[in-house]
Amino acid sequence: MKDLRSLAKYAVLLSLGRINRLRSSRLRFRGAYASYNEAMEHVRPGKLPGYDHDSVTEVSRVWMEQVPVWDYPVLYWLCRLAPDLRRIVDAGGHTGVKYKAFRPYLDLERVDWVVYDLPALVRAGRALAGPKDRTLSFVDRLEDAPEADLLLASGLMPYLDRPLTELVRRLRTPPRHIVLNKVATREGPLLVTLENFRIADVPYQIRPVGEVPAALDALGYDIVDEWVIGGLAHRIETHPELGRAAIRGYVARRRNG
Ligand SMILES: C[S@@+](CC[C@H](N)C(=O)[O-])C[C@H]1O[C@@H](n2cnc3c(N)ncnc32)[C@H](O)[C@@H]1O
């Protein structure tokens, strides 16, 4: 009976996906691919491919400078670790959006906040930085980031075209703490979809649920906190039968001190 019900649900979701494909220009997520490169091959004609374009830097920028409820676990840990934080590397830090968002809650005057991002975002971030952003700086090569106490990757993992292990190993020294937020995960293998930024189609990676914990372990980190952001769970509208993505956060501490 249960099998019959799951089969019926699957068939309904499959049909819903087919209907959704007819109005795909209005959907947030479109397509299901096995890799970042395969997703890039399916960017719609006339749309910019991926994030690294000057005009894409304005998409959702002002919104990302806010503090939505799912940023609070990150803020909690940044406040808790603040006495030991002299430098943060903010990977996927966009134009410094979280530096600006968190300013009312953290004493940023005593933290060196280095954003690592793609070249177009770094250009825009430098152009937008004002006198208040004295401790904010940018690099577009992770290898150029100075040694840091904490690596923050908020909202990066869905857009990152490589594993977390590779990202962390590019740092000069492994930071004492790693804070990840908005990691898209699923039961099953990696799934890449395209997120509709209106002017651009951006590959969005939904990773196997065990991938990030396994990567942190392999890098020599213990997870000390984790959370699921219920409000951000979503399906790929053109392929709802592939299941719901759970959006997660993690705080990890380096094992050897
Ligand atoms: C959704 S934004 C996250 C902004 C902000 N950290 C937040 O939490 O709201 C994702 C960021 O990841 C960056 N990104 C994508 N691929 C990247 C890569 N290979 N290296 C560095 N940054 C990348 C994008 O340029 C973008 O700024």
Image (cartoon, helix red, strand yellow):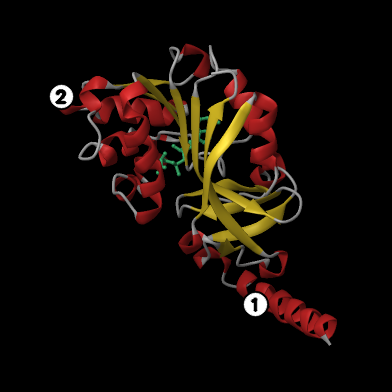
The local secondary structure at tag 1 comes to helix
CB contact under 8 Å: marks 2 and 1: no
Toward the viewer: 100 or 18? 100
Residue named by callout 1: 19
For the residue marked with disc 1, what is the amino acid? Ile
**Residue 47 in view, yes or no:** no
Look at the image and tell me in which quarter the N terminus lies. Answer: bottom right
Residue at the left extreme of this rendering: 131
Left or right: residue 187 versus residue 96 is right
The local secondary structure at tag 2 comes to helix
Q: Position of residue 38 (x, y in %)?
A: 72, 44
Q: Is mark 1 within 8 Å of ligand 1?
A: no
- Residue at the (36%, 22%) spot, across then down: 84
- Residue at the (69%, 76%) spot, across then down: 13
| Residue 131: mark in rendering | 2
Label 2 to label 1: alpha-carbon separation:
51 Å
Left or right: residue 20 versus residue 104 is right
Residue at the bottom extreme of this rendering: 1
